[in-house]
Amino acid sequence: MKKQHIVLFSSVSLILLFVLGIYIYKNYQAQRLGFMAQENASVFVREYSQTLGSDDAKVYLIKFSDPACETCAAFHPFVKQLMGANPGKIKLVIRYAPFHDGADYFVKILEASKNQGKYWETLDTMYKSQRYWASHHNPQPQRIWRFLPRVGLDLDKIRTDMKNPDIVGIINQDLADAKTLNVRKTPGFFVNGKPLSRFGYQQLKELVDYEINKYY
Amino acid sequence: MTIEEKTSNSDWVIVFICWLVASVSTLGSLFFSEIMELAPCALCWYQRIFMFPLVIILLIGLFPFDKNIIKYALPLAIIGWGFAFYHYLLYSGIIPESVQPCSQGVSCSETYLDLFGFLTIPMLSLISFSIIIGFLLILRRRRSK
């Protein structure tokens, strides 16, 4: 064998091995998470987790998100659109993975808005106004208070409620579950326990459609 | 085949092995970061900086075979080895975490992966750099004879 051929052959083998590794690893992950979804559903949905959609929905869309993450904000309307296109079939579960510095603050506001029954409205407003308070070069968390009255929240009550230590417990539990499920970037999506292995709008839609076709 | 041709053939094989080790390490580290999504810590990045170019440099040294490759590849491998060794000490707790350079983001001393119960990522890196240095030194010795 010529030297050139040896090197070429090695290169091709290594790359093939790499691709095979990707395939095996993704398969293994999907299986492991699928098993977890059956045996230990609470890793995906906790008692306290906020959910949107019908209780009869058979497709659970779990979103590990960070209020200060731009991609999470960008996906928010898309997820709502998916739910609108499949009424009653999808249940959205919000889990927290506040990886940005200081993102806990916004999760606390969000959780405090639960007491006033305005969780989803607050989330919508947060994502819409995100660029004003969460810009990367100049984050100004205090600016968020300007946008909250739009939702019709009692701001004094939010300020008291967000100090509730239970919220810290929720954040820690969500972060622990994110670690168990290998969520290292936000948003982290799972559809009925299956992770979104290739990230993107179209890929998420395909995964959701696949599960819908399976159950309906 | 003359004796001279034979020696140069084995020399080529030595560099080829080094290239193979560097390629496997590069692809392996990319697998850890891109596929398994283990974010590389600061020290991992420094080791990558000295491992990735070896793949290219060693490959160029193979066609046509250039004995000067030792001169170019060895410093990279030695510096990389230094980072790997430091990282290994940090990982095994010989150097306390308080003196580590990276504080934000990913911890350099937290164990993310344990293959077969004893192989960690810094150890893999240390082994790869050691093999490359070892072979390059052998080559240098053969050449200086």
Image (spheres, coloured by chain):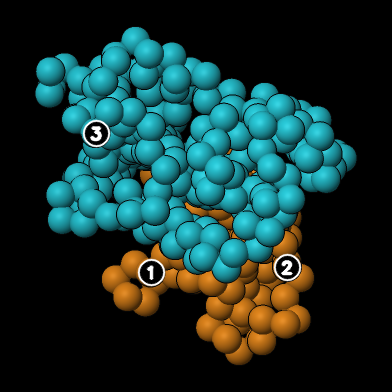
Chain colours: A cyan, B orange
Q: Disc 3 or disc 1, which is closer to the eye? A: 3
Mark 2 = which residue? B103
Q: Residues within 10 Å of mark 1 (few under 14, many from 20)?
A: few
Disc 3 to disc 2, C-alpha distance:
44 Å
Q: Is residue A15 visible?
A: no
Q: Residue at x 38, y 32 (%)?
A: A52
Q: Residue at x 62, y 40 (%)?
A: A67
Residues at discs 3 and 2 both on one chain:
no
- In the image, farthest residue toward the bottom: B94
As helix, strand or loop, the secondary structure at mark 1 comes to loop
Please state which amino acid type lies under the numbered disc 3: Asp
Mark 3 = which residue? A55
Q: Nearer the viewer, residue B86 or A164?
A: A164
Could you tell me which chain the residue with mark 2 belongs to? Answer: B
Disc 1 to disc 2, C-alpha distance:
22 Å
Mark 1 = which residue? B114
Q: Residues within 10 Å of mark 2 (few under 14, many from 20)?
A: few
The N terminus of chain A, quarter of image? top left
